[in-house]
Structure formats: C-alpha cells, structure tokens
Image: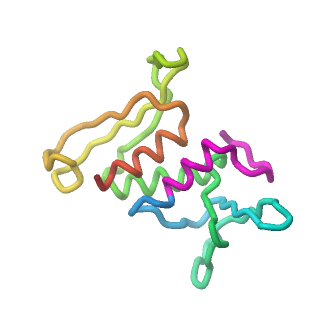
Amino acid sequence: MNDTSNEPMDLELTELARAAVACRSFRWVPGMRCIAMRAEPLEPIITRVPDNTRGWKPYENSLPDLRDAATLGCLLMLARKAWQDETLYVRLSDDFRLSDGKRAWEANGWCNASTSPDKRPGAWRAWGFAHEAETIVACLRGAHQ
C-alpha cells in the first residue's frame, strides 16, 4: 500500500477514503497525503497537510491517500483517539479468509464503558479485512456506532 505515485487511487480505495472522511472522528492531520481531482484536465492534485494547519484548507473533495504509510498512521491515531485506546493495533492475521484464501487483516483493541457499543468494557477484535487501509477505516467507522 505504500504507493506514493501521482496517480489517482483505484475505486475501492477511493470509496474507503470517502468513508473515512465521513466518520465523525475524522480530521486532517499534519503529514497526511491528500488527493483531489481537478475537473479539467482530469488529473490529481496531491498535497500533504502542513505542520501548521492554521489557515490551511484542503482542496474541495480532497480525500486521504490510503496508499501512503504516513496517512494510514494518522488514521490509526484518529481511531485510537476515537476509541480512547492507545493500544489499538492492526495486523496481518495468521488466519485465512474463506472468500479468497488470502491472509486476513485484523484490528484488536480495548474499549471502556463510554466507547463500547453495549456500554460494557472489554477486549474486541475485528477480523477478515482485505488490507490494512480497510481495517483502519473500519476501526474509525466503528468507534461511534
């Protein structure tokens, strides 16, 4: 996923990036790589969120570049804050997905009573994702359900 090309993301990653931006806990974090598409000519505008975000605004329709390692790290940090869990992590599991026979990505963490969907603290695991970006976005999406 560490493709830092100047090409647009594929459709699957674009939809995941839109889902990430739609999350209540999403915000632009310094270091994130963002992509916006110009109307004419149809080419991407690629920038990084600066260290000093005062006065900075992303281009209209900007999305986080889910191929970029720094951006994935920023999104993981946002998920940790949303879950109030600094131990939340994602990893490539030792288990295989039935759908395609590939190793699955998983997320593991701990939720307290205020972040738990059923208001009970405890460990949780989300499993079966195709890649790291999908796993991190799922953590962001699940944080406020």
Asked if 25 appears above or below 102 in the picture, the reply is: below
State the residue at coordinates (14%, 50%). Answer: 119
The x, y position of residue 85, in whole percent, is: 32, 50
Q: Where does the image place residue 45, in percent across and percent down from the top left?
A: 76, 64
Task: Report x, y in % for residue 72.
Answer: 56, 49
- Residue 138, percent across and down? 42, 44
Q: Which residues are magenta?
A: 1-20
Residue that protrudes farthest toward the bottom in the picture: 55
Colouring scheme, one of rainbow, by chain, secondary structure, one colour: rainbow
Q: Residue furthest front?
A: 40
Q: Is residue 49 left or right of residue 79?
A: right
In what quadrant of the picture does the N terminus appear?
Answer: top right
Q: What is the count of numbered marks?
A: 0
Q: Is residue 67 left or right of residue 76?
A: right
The image quadrant that residue 88 belongs to is top left
Magenta stretch: includes residue 60? no
Q: Image point 47% across, 19% down: which residue?
A: 97
Residue 67 falls left or right of residue 117:
right
Q: Observer-nearest residue: 136 or 20?
A: 20
Q: Is residue 17 above or below residue 92?
A: below
| Residue drawn at x 77%, y 66% as measured from the top left | 38
Q: Nearer the viewer, residue 4 or 31?
A: 4
Task: Name which quarter of the figure residue 41 lies in.
Answer: bottom right
